[in-house]
Every structure is written in structure tokens, then in C-alpha cells.
Image: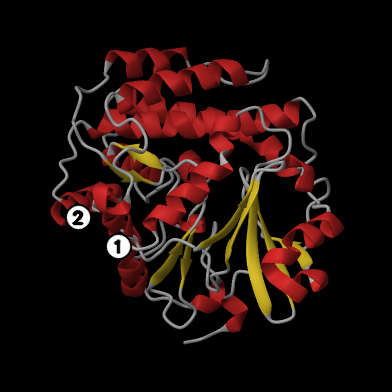
């Protein structure tokens, strides 16, 4: 059912996020040859973190990734890390883009960046494209496949991938909780929500060391994957690897379910959703947890802790983005809305803490 109208397309570059095109052309000439001289640049929509651009020359296309403008948190936008993970996964996980070149010289575009191949396909954002016309059963198959691919990532042999020395899986959960609390403290603005209760509850309910260690994506969601235009139920690409590491796979699953709004959730939470996870046919969180355990053999115990932390982490990510807007580091008006989203996520954390929502 090929439909070029469903293809995820790059568009105009947002004001303030332009690239120095002539300098980039000259730098890439040894890599791209004559094609570098005719390079044109467009920007992919969405994305509040690392920025993604489409470089085109004639019929050839490449993708450039760079950190956001005005970011305070360099460790969250490490291009070399993203490039290394994709290079390592190339032979063991068929869904990652193929990295082509890494540049650490800030003189070229003002920061480090890397180039990768372009994967043509469908990206699903807040709503399903109306022309896609999937039945509820097709939606179910597509979304279960989406989670199965995450399970495949968690099943990658670390030694075979050359990532057995990557990251620090021991103590991962505690470091994540304490680290995101520090990020919250560094990103607080005078108009945002109070998270003291959630922070205390997370510290009081830290689970025991699990010993689990897998490659984890750390931001696996629908608008970070690509589906085939010929078969929209088939996932063909996983994008945005800047936070990938080796750690506890249950944390990674929880991060994805932190985006997963379902029909039984409060209306005020569903209204803030960023993915169409509550449409007819979509599996709910309990079904996803059960399938994940069956297919990977990874036990998911004490999920309320992981779910609450996932929401808190999303809250902090949004607050970091809002911080840039609040202090005038970016003019992107989309960032203003993260203030209200913080209140919604904190309210949901409160329901988990009170036992009213378990998964």
C-alpha cells in the first residue's frame, strides 16, 4: 500500500536553527564528492532535543544530527555517543540508521555533529495520518510490533555488539533517580510545579539491584521510529539514539510507557498525550507488560516505581526544554507549553503514589 503522501518529510528550517551551508558544503566535499556542491538543507518536524536535518543533492539524501541550540545539558546531547552506539549495533540490530561520518570540529557548524543514511518511511506523531486508514486489528499488530522491536534491542548480546564495556549497568537505577533529581534542581523556574513529594517517594522506593544489563534506547517512542510505506505495520528504523546506554531494560520499557496514554486514564492526562496510544485497537500498558515479559524473559516487578520515575523523568526533560525558553535561549514557541505539561505529569505521579494507578 505504497503512498508517498504518508512519507515523513523535511520542511523549512525553524528560525534560529539554520546551518552554515557554504561551510558545510566545503567540509563534506571529500566525503560526498561533487554532490556536496549542490547540497540543500531542510529540517524534520518535531523534536525538542537533538535537531535533525535532511541534506539533499539531486536524488541523493543524507541526515545530519546536531545538539539543540542553547542547551545546558551537554551529556544529554552527546553526538559521539550516538554515533558510537549506531556503529556498534550495525551488525546485530537491523533497525538503526547507518552512521557515515562524525565531526568533532566546532568550527564547521558550531558544534559536533554526525551524518547518517536516510531511511524513507512513515513516522507517526500525535495522531494517526487519516489517509493511513488502519483497522483496530492493524493498529494492534503495528503497536505490538513496535514493542517487540524494543524487546529485540534488549536481547542484543552485549559482547557480540562490542558494547559490553559501554555504560555502567551496576547501580544504574539509583544513579538515574539521583541524576534526574539533580537535573530537576538545575532546571527549576519560578513558575513551575513542586515535585518534592514525588522525589521523596522515588528515593524511598528504590528497588534492589536487579543485575540486568541490556542496550537501552532511553527515548523509544512512536515519533522516534519509522514504519515502511509499503507495509505500515512493519517497523524499519529506530532513530534518536543520543541517550542510549547499557542499563536496566525495565527502565527503558517504563520510559516508553511513560508516553503511553490509554482509554482508562483520566481525561486531563489523555488530553496531554503525544502519541495516539489510546485509539481503538491499541494495547494497554498491562497487556504490553505481559507480552514483554513473555517474549524477553525479563521479569517486570514493582512497576509503579518504574512508571512513576518515567513520568518524573519526562517532567524534567520538559522542564529543561522550558528552561531554555524561559531564559530566552530559544525562540521556539512550542517550548512554552512544557510548563503546563509539568503540572499534568506531576498530577499523574500523585495518582501512582497514592495507589490509584498501578500501570
What residue did someone put label 2 on? 291
Q: Foreground residue, 251 or 131?
A: 251
Q: Please, is residue 131 above or below residue 114 in the view?
A: below
Q: Quadrant of residue 112?
A: top right
- Relative to 145, is 41 on the left or the right? right
Mark 2 crowd level (few <14, some 14–19, many ≥20, 10 Å Cα):
some
Residue depicted at x 55% and y 15% = 185
In the rendering, which numbered label is found on residue 208? none
Count neighbours of disc 1 (C-alpha within 10 A) and say few if under 14, some if 14 to 19, many if 20 or more. Answer: some
142 left or right, relative to 98: left
Please provide percent x and percent y for residue 325: 74, 32
Task: Evaluate whether residue 148 shows in this view.
Answer: yes
The mark found on residue 144 in the picture is 1
* 95 in relation to 15, above or below: below
How many labels, in total? 2
Q: Is residue 274 left or right of residue 167?
A: right
**Regarding mark 1 in the picture, which secondary structure is present there?**
helix
In the structure shown, which secondary structural element does the residue marked by tag 2 occupy? helix
Amino acid at each position: 500500500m505504497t503512498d508517498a503522501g504518508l512519507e515523513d518529510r523535511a520542511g523549512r528550517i525553524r528560525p534560529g536553527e539554520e546551518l552554515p551551508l557554504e561551510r558545510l558544503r566545503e567540509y563534506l566535499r571529500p566525503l560526498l564528492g561533487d554532490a556536496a556542491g549542490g547540497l540543500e538543507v531542510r529540517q524534520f518536524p518535531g523534536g525538542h532535543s537533538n535537531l535533525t536535518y535532511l541534506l539533499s543533492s539531486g536524488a541523493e539524501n543524507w541526515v545530519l544530527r546536531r545538539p539543540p541550540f542553547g542547551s545546558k545539558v551537554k551529556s544529554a546531547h552527546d553526538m559521539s555517543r550516538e554515533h558510537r552506539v549506531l556503529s556498534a549495533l550495525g551488525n546485530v540490530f537491523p533497525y538503526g540508521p547507518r552512521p557515515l561520518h562524525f565531526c568533532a570540529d566546532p568550527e564547521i557548524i558550531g558544534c559536533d555533529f554526525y551524518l547518517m543514511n536516510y531511511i524513507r518511511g512513515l513516522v507517526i506523531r500525535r495522531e494517526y495520518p487519516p489517509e493511513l486508514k488502519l483497522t483496530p486489528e492493524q493498529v494492534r499488530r503495528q503497536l505490538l510490533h513496535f514493542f517487540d522491536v524494543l524487546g529485540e534491542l534488549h536481547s542484543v548480546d552485549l559482547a557480540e555488539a562490542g558494547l559490553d564495556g559501554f555504560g555502567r549497568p551496576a547501580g544504574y537505577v539509583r544513579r538515574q533517580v539521583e541524576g534526574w533529581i539533580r537535573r530537576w534542581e538545575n532546571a527549576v523556574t519560578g513558575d513551575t510545579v513542586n515535585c518534592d513529594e514525588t522525589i521523596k517517594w522515588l528515593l524511598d522506593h528504590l528497588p534492589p539491584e536487579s543485575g540486568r544489563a541490556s542496550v537501552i534506547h532511553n527515548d523509544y517512542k512512536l515519533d522516534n521510529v519509522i514504519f515502511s510505506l509499503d507495509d505500515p505495520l512493519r517497523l524499519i528504523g529506530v532513530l534518536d539514539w543520543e541517550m542510549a546506554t547499557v542499563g536496566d531494560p525495565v527502565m527503558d520499557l517504563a520510559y516508553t510507557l511513560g508516553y503511553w496514554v490509554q482509554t482508562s486514564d483520566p481525561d486531563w492526562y489523555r488530553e496531554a498525550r503525544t502519541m495516539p496510544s489510546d485509539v481503538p485497537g491499541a494495547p494497554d500498558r498491562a497487556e504490553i507488560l505481559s507480552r514483554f515479559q513473555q517474549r524477553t524473559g525479563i521479569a517486570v516487578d514493582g512497576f509503579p516505581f518504574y512508571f512513576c520515575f518515567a513520568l518524573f523523568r519526562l517532567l524534567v526533560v520538559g522542564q529543561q526544554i522550558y528552561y531554555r525558553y524561559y531564559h530566552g535561549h530559544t525562540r521556539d514557541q512550542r517550548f512554552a507549553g512544557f510548563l503546563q505539561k509539568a503540572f499534568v505529569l506531576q498530577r499523574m505521579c500523585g495518582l501512582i503514589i497514592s495507589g490509584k494507578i498501578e500501570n
